[in-house]
Image (cartoon, rainbow, N blue to C red):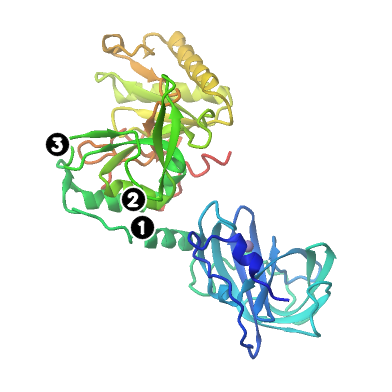
Amino acid sequence: MGNLKEYNQKRDFKKTKEPYGSKNSGKSKKLKYIIQHHMARREHYDLRLEYNGVFISFAVPKGPSFNTKDKRLAVKVEDHPLSYGNFEGTIPKGEYGGGTVMLWDKGTWEPHFKPDFKKGPIKFTINGKRIKGDYTLVKFKDDNWLLIKEKDEFVSNVKITKFKTSIKTDRTMNEISNNEVKEDLDDIEITHPDKIIIPKGHITKKDIITYYKLVAKRMFPFLENRLISTIRCPDGVNGEIFYMKHLNTDSKNIGKKLVKDKDSQNKDYYYIKNALGLIEEVQMNSYEFHIWGCKQNSTNKPDILVFDFDPDEKLSLKKLRDGVKDLKKVLDKLKLKSYLKTSGGKGYHVFVPLKTTSWNKTEKIASNISEVMVNNNPSKYTINMRKEKREGKIFIDYFRNKKGATSVSPYSIRLKDNAPISCPISWKELDLIKPQSITIKNIKDRLKKKDAWANFFNN
Ligand code: MN
């Protein structure tokens, strides 16, 4: 009993902050008990009972109950080291158990007779802060057990979901994951923080870094593993400007991907693996982020459809907004869920999440929709790129839906006066927010509110 080999094999300790598993030979006076609330791919509660120098562990999808009528599924998983009893934090996405772990309860436990974790049943008393009293674990098949509350003075109808904070740090799940990201980001060394990048508005490199740290969590789903290009300007917008399409760093947080271009040449495009990579890229003076419509591991399957509404300079804001609403109506009719953002430039952008399709199909959808709009209202819209054809009209730029084309990422700053942001907004805000009015200076309050694009990739 008590074997941490499986625990250690499942984890890459270069990537996760979970403790390395070594057996504790010392004997606790009382056997430790903990429960960790774990927001992994599937949310669950991990019940851990100290025995023979390790934590015997069960993943309980609904967690324990205070009600004797509930039989809760408890799946026996690999033994964990006792040092796991202090672990709270985030396990990187893609790693085993990736997600956020909260220390949800702790205390001691006492078996009523010598426990047999191979066969069960196990009758025991928990003495935790939130869970107390008698429980039984009954094995029914393979690793599947049932956790049942026994009759005692602690029986109640209270739901365990009432307890939403850590027993150790009093933090919520969101607070735990946000704090972790920030601690890591703060370790990156920033050179020339006081250099002014955008003179109008007096925006320094430090301002930009601080901003990206603040939005990293919201922005990252749109950057993660997605091929990108960036705009670098080491000496600010009045200095030399570089359009970065290819990898030039050896950071382990940034990856390289060979993609055949139209001349069948392999080129090494690049992508960011995690929030650290994002901040490292900003430290390298990349300030504006443009994304492909696909992920690096499926470059032939676009997952975002993009419409860029680019108005002629003379066009009124009202007409521009009416145009964006027209597009929404068309997309609604097609049952395509759409998301709105400011461009940070002259117009608005509409993004539509796509399920697996091809570039040809994506381009076809985009061009058909745009053509329908032009045909219905030729005086309002054009898909002709030539400037003289665009007078008084909105140019619907659907040409970004091609392999290798990019569009500005949600939450990227634009290298313009006052550092406007290409900022996700709700459809209700279309009439209230101008394309350039959300900037690095005023976005803070917005970030306290609900993210209008939170479910973008989950529908
Ligand atoms: Mn777990």
* Residue marked by disc 1: 185
Looking at the image, tell me whether mark 2 or mark 1 is earlier in sequence order: 1
Three-letter amino acid code at the position of disc 2:
Ile
**What amino acid is at disc 1?**
Leu
Indicate if the residue with disc 3 has its beta carbon within 8 Å of ligand 1. no
Q: For disc 1, does the CB lie below 8 Å from ligand 1?
A: no
- Earlier sequence position, callout 1 versus callout 3: 1
**Label pair 3/2, CB-CB below 8 angstroms:** no
Q: From the viewer's perspective, is residue 368 above or below residue 416?
A: above
Q: Amino acid at mark 3?
A: Asn
Image location (x, y in percent) of residue 344: 30, 34
According to the image, label 3 marks what residue? 238
Q: Is residue 141 visible?
A: yes
Q: Is residue 427 left or right of residue 51?
A: left
Element under disc 3? loop
Quadrant position of the N terminus in the picture? bottom right
Query: Which residue sits at x=58%, y=31%?
Result: 355
Give the percent coordinates (x, y) of residue 245.
Answer: 34, 33
**Label 2 CB sits under 8 Å from any ligand 1 atom:** no
Furthest toward the front, the residue is 265
- As measured in the structure, the alpha-carbon distance from the residue carrying label 2 to the one carrying label 1 is 7 Å
* Callouts 2 and 1 close, C-beta under 8 Å: yes
Query: Quarter of the image holding residue 410?
Result: top left
Q: Which mark is residue 279?
A: 2
Crowding near pointer 3: few (<14 within 10 Å), some, many (20+)?
A: few
- Within 10 angstroms of label 1, few (less than 14), some, or many (20 or more) residues? many
Q: Is residue 429 visible?
A: no
